[in-house]
Image (cartoon, rainbow, N blue to C red):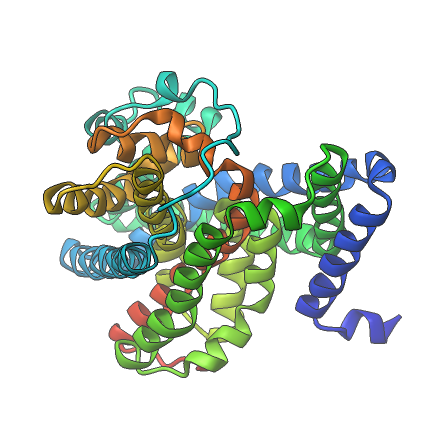
Amino acid sequence: MAKLKSFPLHWQILIMLVAGGLFGYYFPSATEYTNWVGEVFLRALNMIIVPLILFSITTGVASVGSSGNLGRLGIKTMGYYVFSTLAAIVTGFILVTTIKPGVGADLGFKVPVENIAAASEGFGQTLIKIIPTNIINSLAQGEMLAIIFFAVLFGFFITKIGDKSRHQLMDVLNAALDVIMKITLFIIMFTPLGIFSITAKVIAQQILLGNEITEVISRLGLYFVTVLAGLVFHGFVTLPLSVKLLGRANPFRHLRNMATPLLTAFSTSSSNATLPLSMEAVEVEDGVSNKIASFTLPLGATVNMNGTALYECVAVIFIAQAYGIDLTMGQQLIVIFTALLAAIGAAGIPMAGLVMMAVVLKAVGLPLEGIGLILAVDRILDMFRTAINVYSDTCAAVIIAKSEGEKLKV
């Protein structure tokens, strides 16, 4: 029993990821008896996301101290997020315009799309909604941008009250955060079981729908390879180089330390659900302070979506190529810029992935129905791009911590 407990969690997750895939492939009908495990696991993770973000950002901002320190930290963090997201988009843009996967694509292989236009909103409206009219309602609805805005504001003004009140309030908030982290560690113990169930369900759904995964990928093969190549380049070249050059840290050791959150992100396709594991790994394995991790990671899980932004750029240009529409240089620049803005503003919108795509398509006048061309392989690519999203957040935490003079384990 002691040996089992000492068995590294990331190896447990990897084994259950493979086992779940095999179970779903060979026994798809039997997954109806295991699906509840994954649902319970995701519900447990989602249960702690809102209080984790609220308490971690509030305490993180309050512990930064003066407005000058907060401003410096905020500028550094957002500056890196914009840089890394833009680097991802440019990588995708270069690949899709070079490989041209949409030229001669089979337009008959389309998945029906519903309610995309109704769900999409302008980017400006999304920014306005960052300011909540009712924070209790925002907490109940899980509106992450609004929660982050309030938490930053609340944490900042904690530093402006008297010493006695500030210390009392910080004691309460830190104690609440400690409890949330204890709950998180308890939930993390069941991660391998949750991963097994989720993976089995995803594979079984494809089998039961009669979709041979290899056939789907072959029909959209060049597009699939283009997105995947961009994600691999960004994940194994751009981000490690940024850790090495900007953070002056060991990128390989950092990547190894992030094995558990990355495998969880890959299997759940949820940056928010992976946030508790990311914070735990960055603080314990990398040695980043709670002050930096509590500020950068929750913010990154909401606004720093490198993998998604890259995918949006490639997908939109692929759709244009498939329809035989030659985008002008101006339109291509609009795609890059809109993908960047959509990646920042997506978290507060329902159906975030599809709506982001709709926003970018609308910006250059392409038909929204084009989304149906790429949905067949979207679920598979979503696993990869979510892992890149999470990895970029953890890289940011290391880089910002190093820039603040912290001594890390990497």
Instruction: Give the residue drawn at x 41%, y 49%.
Output: 301
Viewed as shown, does residue 385 lie left or right of 146? right
Whether residue 260 is visible here, answered yes or no, is yes
Question: In the rendering, at what x and y percent does residue 299 appear?
Answer: 35, 49
- 362 or 12: nearer the eye? 362
Viewed as shown, does residue 1 lie left or right of 139? right
- 232 or 65: nearer the eye? 232
Viewed as shown, does residue 99 lie left or right of 5? left
> Is 169 drawn above or below residue 4 in the view shown?
above
Instruction: Give the residue drawn at x 55%, y 38%.
Output: 376
Question: In the rendering, at what x and y percent does residue 352 appear?
Answer: 41, 33
Instruction: Give the residue drawn at x 87%, y 39%.
Output: 30
Image quadrant in which the N terminus is located: bottom right
Question: In the rendering, at what x and y percent does residue 327 appear?
Answer: 19, 41
Instruction: Give the residue drawn at x 21%, y 32%.
Output: 363
Q: Quadrant of residue 251?
A: bottom left
Q: Residue furthest left?
A: 330
> Is 199 drawn above or below residue 407 in the view shown?
above
Number of numbered labels in the structure image: 0
- 113 or 57: nearer the eye? 113
Q: Quadrant of residue 93?
A: bottom left
- 188 or 153: nearer the eye? 188
Image quadrant in which the C terminus is located: bottom left
Whether residue 154 is visible here, answered yes or no, is no
Question: In the rendering, at what x and y percent does residue 278 appear?
Answer: 51, 59
